[in-house]
Image: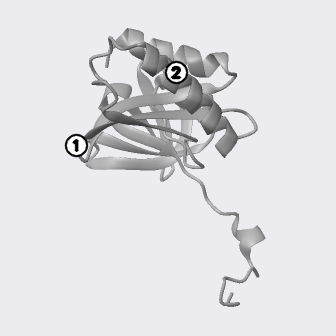
Amino acid sequence: MNENFLRNIEDIVESLGYECVHVSLRSDFGRLKLQILIDTLGGINAGDCELVSGKVSGYLDEASDIPELDKGRYYLEVSSPGIERPLYKPEDYARFQGREARLRLSDPIGGRKTFTGTIQRSAEGTVTIICDGQETDIPFSSIRGGNLVYRFNDDKDKGKRNKRGKK
């Protein structure tokens, strides 16, 4: 994706007071899909997505010289990264140090391609994670995908009933 195009979208999102978590452009059933993930300290609601969508749509309508978006043959999706937020950049791993994450690798390390554990640090192109009591250094270039892991608090959830009234 054109770096200028990406930077312009990030600038729009940030000028509205949101964090631009990620921008992707990919084919989805023969049509281009421009997906923008936004976040803010208090979380994201539908109004936030609508505001960003309107501003980005205005930019896209004016920027007719963007070859990736062939005259309206795309759709725009603006959403929250969700509770199991994806991690895209080394800075994301540093920001969420101490949190549990799942990393999927392109090539195995120690016979494993998936690590779920606590992020210890992210520095000098390496993410260090404690998984199964063992500290492992993973080159950022080997990470195919990563996301935070959310676990329900078992103590809080004990005794709660499901829709059918069963524990």
Residue denoted by label 2: 58
Q: Is residue 151 left or right of residue 93?
A: right
User: Residue 3 at what x, y percent from top left?
Assistant: 37, 12
Image point 77% across, 69% down: which residue?
Answer: 156
Point out which mark residue 2 bears.
none
Q: Residues within 10 Å of mark 2 (few under 14, many from 20)?
A: few
Q: Is residue 122 visible?
A: no
Q: Secondary structure at mark 2?
A: helix
Image point 64% across, 31% down: which residue?
Answer: 51
User: Is 56 rendered above or below residue 86?
Assistant: above
* In the foreground, 84 or 19: 19
- The amino acid pointed to by label 2 is Gly
Of the two numbered discs 1 and 2 in the rendering, the one whose residue sits closer to the viewer: 2
Residue denoted by label 1: 30
Q: Is residue 90 left or right of residue 19?
A: left
- Figure quadrant of residue 74: top left
* In the foreground, 126 or 65: 65
Q: Earlier in the sequence, mark 1 or mark 2?
A: 1
- The amino acid pointed to by label 1 is Gly
User: Residue 106 at what x, y percent from top left?
Assistant: 26, 39
Mark 1 → mark 2, Cα distance in angstroms: 23 Å
Q: Secondary structure at mark 1?
A: loop
User: Residue 126 at what x, y percent from top left?
Assistant: 42, 25
Image point 75% across, 70% down: which residue?
Answer: 155
User: Residue 136 at what x, y percent from top left?
Assistant: 42, 38
Q: Quadrant of the N terminus?
A: top left
Q: Quadrant of the C terminus?
A: bottom right
* In the foreground, 145 or 51: 51
